[in-house]
Image (cartoon, rainbow, N blue to C red):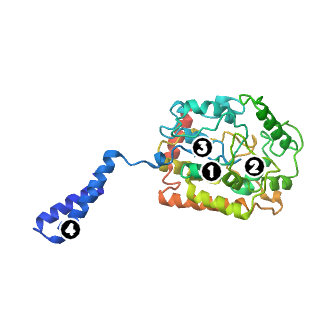
Amino acid sequence: MSGLLSRHLVLIALALASGHDHTFEVRLHEESGALQLLQQKLAFGEPTLLEAAEPIYWLHCAKCGSSFINALIHLPGVCPLASSLVVDEQSLGDCYMEKWKFECPEACLAKKFFCPHFSDAFPHQPIDNYTARKGALVGMFRNPEQRILSAYHDDADNFATVNYEDHLQDLLAMHVSGSLNMSVCHQPVPGLSKVPVLEFAESWKGGMTYQLVVEHNNLHPTTQTLDPDRPKMTRADAEEAARRVREGFSFVGITEDWDLSICLLHKMFGGACQASDFEDTRPSSETKSAHADYDIDELMGWHDDVDRVVYDAAVEVFQGNLIAYGVSHDSCRECYSHAERGRVQTA
């Protein structure tokens, strides 16, 4: 029985006991109206937070957690044909995030989840239309310096290799000519030397901001997020990006607080926590834990003061939601336990 219905019955009893007290009659009338509204909501069903956020649009910022895709596609009713699928190398092979684009339209419901177009060959594209996507956006955000160092030391994707810009241009040329086949891997030539770390950091500076504010047709991009020569972001860009994080996202998670982020996601959107929600499917190296920080001394005092604005906004939203939904490590023990049981069963 709801609290409103219980209170309504109490008022009826008090009104009967007091005869025809006018105060009770007024309160009873007010409660009756509220009760009717509650009954209407129960009859027709109020949209849940998940339903209100659909179709979910994942803004996948580079090096903020590809593994988040598994938590999203396993939300209730979102991707019915992917209920037992884990998007990782073991399931889909090399370049599995690219191959997932082929699987997504078949596995997920278009009204519930936005699938990137399979011909969109360029990784980590910006929001294609913020106005249309506002309220349906979800994403993980990461400490800017940690994000950049993670990319620099990613020897699988080779973001820092000296030929990475040429690699992107080759992809673009193949895309324009129609010869690009996204069912196979397209990686930069491995083994080449890396650009100096500070040069790389400058080229990646403001990357999260870029994805939030630079809108273009993703099928025909004018610039690419990971292009070292893409337009530089300003403080004004960062402020607008931060506003979008605060106002346009139905869910904001923090990579450094991955476990709490996953627990919060399920607290808000429903569904049980699963082992795959907590697994790092794309570590930067085999020896680096996703939960261990990189040594920022490597940056010699350099900071990404643009993306810092965005990150601070994301942390603010995240911490506010932890309080609003009563999420803490203590309250998440059931979530963690359920995920651990799933990990043991699949081991």
Any mark on residue 279, and which? none
Neighbour tally class for label 1: few under 14, some 14-19, many 20 plus, Cα within 10 Å: many
Q: Which percent across, then down, holds residue 300?
A: 83, 61
Residue carrying label 2: 150
* Residue 217 seen in the current view: yes
Q: Is there a contact, CB below 8 Å, between mark 2 and mark 3?
A: no
Numbered-mark total = 4
Any mark on residue 278, and which? 3
Kind of residue sitting beneath label 2: Ser
| Left or right: 287 as drawn, with respect to 272 | right
| Left or right: 315 as drawn, with respect to 5 | right
Kind of residue sitting beneath label 4: Val
Q: Which percent across, then down, holds residue 116?
A: 63, 38
Q: Which percent across, then down, holds residue 162?
A: 88, 44
Of circles 4 and 3, which is in front?
4
Of circles 2 and 3, which is in front?
2
Residue carrying label 1: 140
Residue carrying label 4: 26
Kind of residue sitting beneath label 1: Met
What is the CA distance from the residue labelled 4 to the residue labelled 1?
49 Å
Is 208 drawn above or below residue 123 in the view shown? Answer: below
Is 87 drawn above or below residue 323 in the view shown? Answer: above
Kind of residue sitting beneath label 3: Phe
Out of 268 and 30, give the one closest to the viewer: 30
